[in-house]
Image: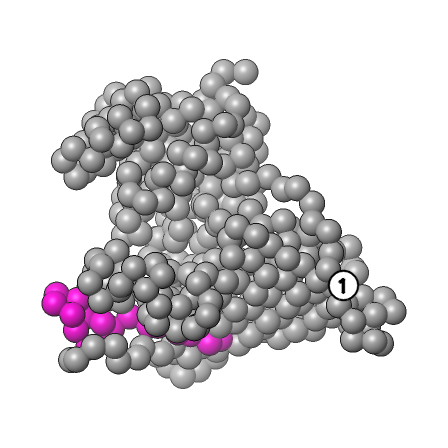
Amino acid sequence: MATRRILLLGTGGIATHHVQEFADLPNVKIVACVDSVPGRADAFAARYHIAEAFPSLEAAIAWGDFEAAINCTPDAVHKPTTLALIAAGKHVFCEKPLAPNYPDAMEMTEAAEKAGLVNMVNLTYRNSPAVQEARAMVQAGEIGELRHVEAAYRQSWLVSKAWGDWRTDEKWLWRLSKAHGSTGVLGDVGVHILDFATYAAGDKIVTVKADLATFRKAEGDRIGDYRLDANDSFAMTGRMASGALATIVATRYATGHMNDLALALHGTKGSLKLETDGRKSKLWGCLGNDVEKFRWRKLELPQVKRNARRFADALASGVNGGLSFRRAAEMQQIIDAAFASDKSGKEIKLA
């Protein structure tokens, strides 16, 4: 089988993760990288032994000796760069969020599907074996009919310096400012916790009621050029297509939590609860006779494919898989509805 040649677009922090994820996979190879910051692509290529480096996507496309691209550009640049890659006939593995809003995400989705190209989004928590096992158990009917879903994404970098000091580090400051492209914690990690919850539940959210909060963090709500006006926490309730109720929250003020996702799935025959920090996962079940004793048992977890492998397999088979642009667009539709609900104070029905 021929080796698929991959372009790495953007050489920021997440790019190193992708180099590591794709390094040992058969039949794929990162052969070039792109960065618009002078000298950065050359330095990255030298560090990771990548054969080619380009100062622009246009230059890389003109060269053209690649079949697919990993899009690691900043959020606001995902749409134009991805559309340019699609127009050039290249398959795309894009970082989240796919786009800043649902219409843009659907434009990208329809362009990729029309072109017949593999299109996937790096929804990283699909790498968790706990979420994969929970989904399989729900689909097998092991918890009965779904009644309630509880999901939480807890970070603490606004109260802890473990990740760096957001007051002085641009890497974090921009995430607090709308003018610098941030849509707050809802836009940043909302796609993760929404995909995590609905994927495990095997269900869709059809209505949303949301409340977003932005807290005072500095004098005048500003640090230098950064106006600190993006949301720091959100809470939402939603009805799922099955009729189950969902409660979903995320915050950057969860003291004691560096980067933790938690999910509970409650049904008519039992419940599941799972936790992951992106590296380790745990899953517990309260099932069968344990329901009457309120007893939870830790469950064994299977080995699962990681997203890089899923993309490599999709390139080989031409079958896109569940991490599609369309899936990411569906999550963006919920996020857009949450913003609309917060603004109006009303429940929003999804089309």
Report crowding for label 1: few under 14, some 14 to 19, many 20 or more residues within 10 A (C-alpha). few
Q: Residue furthest top?
A: 1
- Is residue 330 found inside the magenta-colored segment of the image? no
Which picture quadrant has residue 229? bottom left
Which picture quadrant has residue 265? bottom right
- Considering the image in quadrants, where does the N terminus appear? top right
Q: Position of residue 318 (x, y in %)?
A: 54, 29
- Is residue 224 found inside the magenta-colored segment of the image? yes
Residue for point 32% across, 23% down:
49
Q: Position of residue 196 (x, y in %)?
A: 55, 58
Q: Secondary structure at mark 1?
A: strand
Residue kind at label 1, given as amino acid type = Arg
Q: Is residue 44 left or right of residue 310?
A: left
Q: Is residue 37 left or right of residue 82?
A: left
Identify the residue position indicated by label 1 in the image.
297
One can see residue 203 in this view: no
Which picture quadrant has residue 53? top left
* Marker count (numbered): 1
Q: In the rendered structure, which segment of residues is drawn in magenta?
A: 221-236
Given residues 50 and 316, the one toward you in this image is 50
> Is 314 situated above or below 304?
above
Q: Residue furthest left?
A: 224
Residue for point 32% across, 64% down:
161
**Colour logic:** one colour
Residue for point 69% across, 49% down:
301
Given residues 246 and 330, the one toward you in this image is 246
> Is 252 situated above or below 181?
below
Residue for point 42% across, 44% down:
110
One can see residue 110 in this view: yes
Q: Position of residue 123 (x, y in %)?
A: 48, 50
> Is 121 situated above or below 224?
above
Given residues 140 and 254, the one toward you in this image is 254
